[in-house]
Image (cartoon, rainbow, N blue to C red):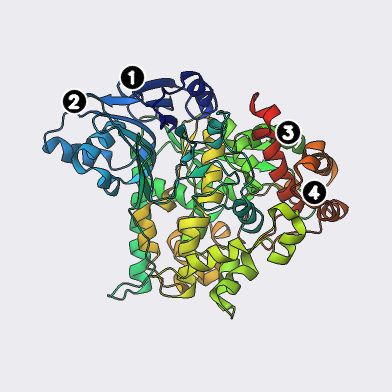
């Protein structure tokens, strides 16, 4: 796992080494083990390495194969790299390293741009063809690894986070009205290629982008997810066995492809607990597990230790628990926000940030249960959507949108008002072909679009802020392809994730399987009072916020007058959402802070 950055000059000039130095500073937390730069004519690569596979210097990056005329920078992990290596060796390729990075170089030499279709894993990479002077960018099928870019008349730049791109003085930092609409309506999800800022875009999942030194671009979508029943019907038992085997394999290969110890983030929920059970079922011993908890509020408990402790005890893991007091959460919030590539309102973002800080002192790689709810239908709103009547969009909107169009127009000032961009986008995505039932449409939308820019991005940013690689077995693309074929009843049945609960029965305590769905709580960011309320009030009443003119003051005053009364349909605090957005802009975009962060 690493941080990548690059600049391709489009004006005949030379790349800026000083700027690259600043960009790499913003990626240093992602890759604490090595820094490298490399240039060829109009192209400059920068890389920060987190050593996980082949710890030797031979796998340092940028990696250049002079014989093939190719150079590469890569962030991620290729889980089938050993199989690909053997296949490529049989074709006559010679390897000088033992890791997965070099396999991508040889795969591109053999198959060209379709090489991505041979890769199983999570990845974002940039490959430079020294002979053709073309830059090839690629992102994994489900967007687990991030890849941002900006284009000006002078240069095309890319990086693993937006902060690295903002190190350049010529990036357009004006608010993108469409991105803002998504941010405030879609639970802070801004689907690719847009971001909150006009001058920064991101490569969509399952997409490649090729650009030459003259600025000519072409992109290609190389994978599309179908959600249809197979021609040959299966019984529930057969489906359960197939999912169990696919999940066992997904967990196992994310353990095997590492030359360092691998732990598990054990939240106490079904998903992460099942990962522990499956690893033990596969014969893994000496498991290391990690849990975090926060202070309770009267309305909500701040930890799930009562569920994680029995799982750790059953499998005799080396278990670590961390209880974080509220004053510590508030103290560390600014640091966590500077590590967000985009504004993230999920209250568990800071939880992952503080947990990762502790976990990174013990291991470099962890497995996480992210994605199970989206892939296997675990959230409370799925059955509600399925039971609704009306258009596909209305069924979705009533249970997911943070605010409807009328409230959005009351939220932002005139400069940012416009049509219902989010409704248009969601209607288009739901209407895409090859989804058999309405719930198939919704789950495919969630897995291919919404999850990418909410929990998946959150986990990547917050763990990589401490040089900790998080692997997500539930987003193994082969497992996802299988899961999308399941009848919806095997997902939302039995209170959600029916097939996973069947697999877990006998492997986990019944109390963990049958408990109500938990949400990695940080209650102080949902029930806003005391110092947290003071903190958010100061942000929204600050001179920077008033001069930015993003929010209507009447709307902010309504939130501040009743800070706990305004929750979204997904039970998030609208006050926190507003404060976080403004705070992110102040820390990451405003000129006075961009120089120092």
Q: Which residue is mark 1?
A: 57
State the residue lying farthest toward the bottom: 389
Residue 292 visible, this orientation: no
Q: Which residue is mark 3?
A: 328
Q: Residues within 10 Å of mark 1 (few under 14, many from 20)?
A: few
Q: Residues within 10 Å of mark 3 (few under 14, many from 20)?
A: few
Q: Position of residue 113 (x, y in %)?
A: 27, 44
As drawn, is 348 to the left or to the right of 467? right
Helix, strand, or loop for circle 4?
loop
Tell which circle, 3 or 1, labels the residue nearer the N-terminal end. 1
Distance between mark 3 and mark 4 Cα atoms: 16 Å
Question: Which residue sits at x=41%, y=73%?
Answer: 487
Q: Which residue is mark 2?
A: 67
Q: Which residue is mark 4?
A: 528
**Which mark is nearer the camera, 3 or 1?**
1
Tell which circle, 4 or 2, labels the residue nearer the N-terminal end. 2
Number of residue marks? 4
Distance between mark 4 and mark 2 Cα atoms: 60 Å
């Amino acid at each position: 796992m690493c941080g990548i950055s690059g600049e391709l000059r489009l004006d005949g000039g030379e790349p800026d080494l000083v700027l690259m130095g600043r960009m790499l500073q913003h990626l240093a937390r992602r890759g604490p083990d090595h820094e490298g730069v490399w240039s060829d004519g109009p192209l400059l690569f920068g890389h920060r390495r987190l050593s996980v596979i082949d710890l030797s210097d031979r796998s340092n990056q940028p990696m250049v194969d002079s014989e093939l005329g190719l150079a590469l920078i890569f962030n991620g992990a290729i889980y089938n790299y050993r199989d690909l290596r053997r296949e490529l060796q049989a074709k006559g390729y010679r390897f000088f390293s033992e890791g997965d990075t070099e396999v991508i170089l040889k795969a591109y030499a053999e198959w060209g741009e379709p090489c991505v279709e041979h890769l199983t894993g999570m990845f974002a990479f940039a490959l430079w063809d020294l002979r053709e002077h073309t830059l090839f960018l690629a992102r994994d099928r489900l967007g687990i690894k991030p890849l941002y870019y900006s284009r000006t008349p002078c240069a095309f730049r890319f990086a693993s986070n937006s902060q690295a791109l903002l190190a350049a003085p010529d990036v357009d930092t004006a608010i993108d009205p469409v991105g803002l609409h998504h941010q405030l309506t879609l639970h802070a999800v801004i689907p690719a290629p847009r971001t909150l800022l006009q001058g920064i875009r991101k490569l969509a999942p399952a997409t490649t982008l090729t650009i030459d030194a003259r600025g000519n671009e072409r992109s290609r979508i190389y994978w599309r997810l179908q959600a249809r029943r197979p021609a040959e019907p299966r019984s529930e038992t057969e489906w359960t066995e197939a999912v169990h085997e696919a999940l066992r394999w997904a967990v196992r290969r994310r353990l095997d492809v590492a030359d360092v110890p691998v732990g598990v983030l054990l939240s106490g929920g079904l998903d992460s607990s099942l990962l522990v059970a499956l690893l033990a079922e596969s014969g893994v011993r000496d498991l290391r597990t990690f849990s975090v908890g926060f202070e309770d509020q009267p309305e909500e408990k701040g930890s799930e230790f009562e569920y994680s402790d029995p799982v750790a005890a059953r499998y005799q893991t080396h278990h670590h628990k961390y209880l974080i007091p509220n004053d510590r959460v508030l103290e560390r919030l600014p640091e966590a926000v500077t590590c967000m590539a985009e504004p993230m309102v999920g209250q568990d973002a800071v939880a992952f940030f503080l947990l990762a800080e502790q976990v990174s002192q013990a291991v470099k790689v962890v497995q996480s249960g992210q994605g199970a709810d989206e892939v296997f239908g675990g959230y409370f709103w799925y059955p509600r959507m399925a039971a609704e009547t009306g258009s596909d969009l209305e069924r979705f909107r009533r249970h997911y949108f943070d605010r409807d169009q009328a409230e959005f127009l009351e939220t932002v000032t005139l400069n940012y008002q416009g049509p219902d961009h989010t409704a248009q986008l969601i209607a288009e995505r739901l209407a895409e072909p090859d989804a058999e039932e309405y719930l198939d449409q919704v789950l495919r939308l969630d897995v291919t679009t919404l999850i990418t820019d909410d929990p998946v991005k959150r986990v990547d940013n917050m763990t990589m802020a401490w040089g900790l690689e998080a692997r997500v077995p539930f987003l193994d693309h082969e497992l996802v392809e299988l899961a999308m074929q399941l009848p919806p009843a095997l997902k939302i049945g039995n209170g959600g994730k029916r097939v996973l609960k069947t697999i877990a029965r006998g492997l986990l305590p019944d109390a963990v399987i049958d408990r109500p769905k938990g949400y990695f709580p940080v209650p102080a960011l949902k029930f806003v009072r005391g110092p947290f309320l003071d903190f958010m009030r100061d942000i929204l009443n600050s001179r920077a916020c008033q001069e930015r003119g993003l929010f209507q003051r009447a709307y902010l005053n309504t939130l501040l007058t009743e800070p706990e009364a305004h929750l979204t349909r997904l039970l998030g605090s609208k006050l926190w959402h507003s404060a976080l957005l403004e705070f992110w802009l102040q820390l990451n975009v405003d000129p006075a802070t961009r120089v120092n962060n």
